[in-house]
Image (cartoon, rainbow, N blue to C red):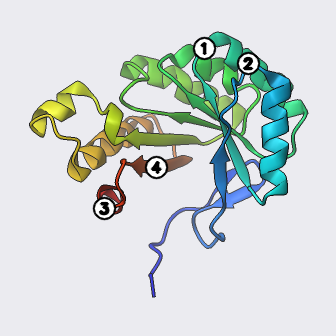
Amino acid sequence: MIQRAATKKIYVGDVAVGGDAPISVQSMTFSDTADVEATVDQINRLHFAGCDIVRVAVPDMSAAKALEHIKKNISLPLVADIHFNYKYALIAAKSVDCIRINPGNIGSEEKAKKVIKMAVKKDIPIRIGVNAGSLEKEILDQYNGKATAEAMVESALKHINILEKNNFEKILKSLKASDIERTVEAY
């Protein structure tokens, strides 16, 4: 039997994650988030299928601005998956239940501090999402260009430390690789 590690319980909207909470199902839409109608339709279908939390891609400003309209038309907790630009996170935080940032592509610590400040103001968690395919160059260089499980953990810890240094504690963590073995090893 698998023994679950003791973790802190954090809420994404009204869904508890971690601690003694049951494992929640999270999925992600594949629509263009700026297309509010298509995104809401996908989210409602995911809800019907048993999804507890939904994540949407925020690759540009139009997607960030669409989140307010999406949130008004769904009942699931909404996570904004921020791509490349911290400014999208600042806009998204006004409407969503969680911000997901990828440490390899959000930018400097100063930009992260702005996202932290907004997350504190809106009382929402930040999910650190590390993908083996988008690790920071300096971390990849330390591991001879290989996105090892250790490199993924180093990336996650680097960014978790930024959040903790700024007294931010509502942290969710996600590490993934294209193969199960590396993902499990990273965890």
Numbered badge on residue 130: none
Q: Which residue is mark 3?
A: 181
Residue under label 1: 60
Q: First in sequence: mark 4 or mark 2?
A: 2
At x 69%, y 60%, the residue is: 16
In the rendered structure, are the residues bearing label 1 and label 2 in contact, judged by CB atoms less than 8 Å apart? Answer: yes
Mark 2: amino acid: Ala
Q: Residue furthest top?
A: 61
Q: Which residue is at 58% across, 63% downward?
A: 18
- Between the residue at mark 1 and the residue at mark 2, the CA separation in whole angstroms equals 9 Å
Please provide percent x and percent y for residue 117. 57, 26
The residues tagged by marks 3 and 4 sit, at their Cα atoms, a distance apart of: 15 Å
Q: Does the CB distance between marks 3 and 4 fall below 8 Å?
A: no
Whether residue 158 is visible to the viewer of this picture, yes or no, is: yes
Residue type at mark 4? Answer: Ser
Sequence order check, earlier mark of 3 and 1: 1
Taking the spot 29% from the left edge, 56% from the top edge, the residue there is 182
Left or right: where 30 falls relative to 87: right
**Which residue corresponds to mark 4?**
174
Q: Confirm whether residue 164 shows in the render.
A: no
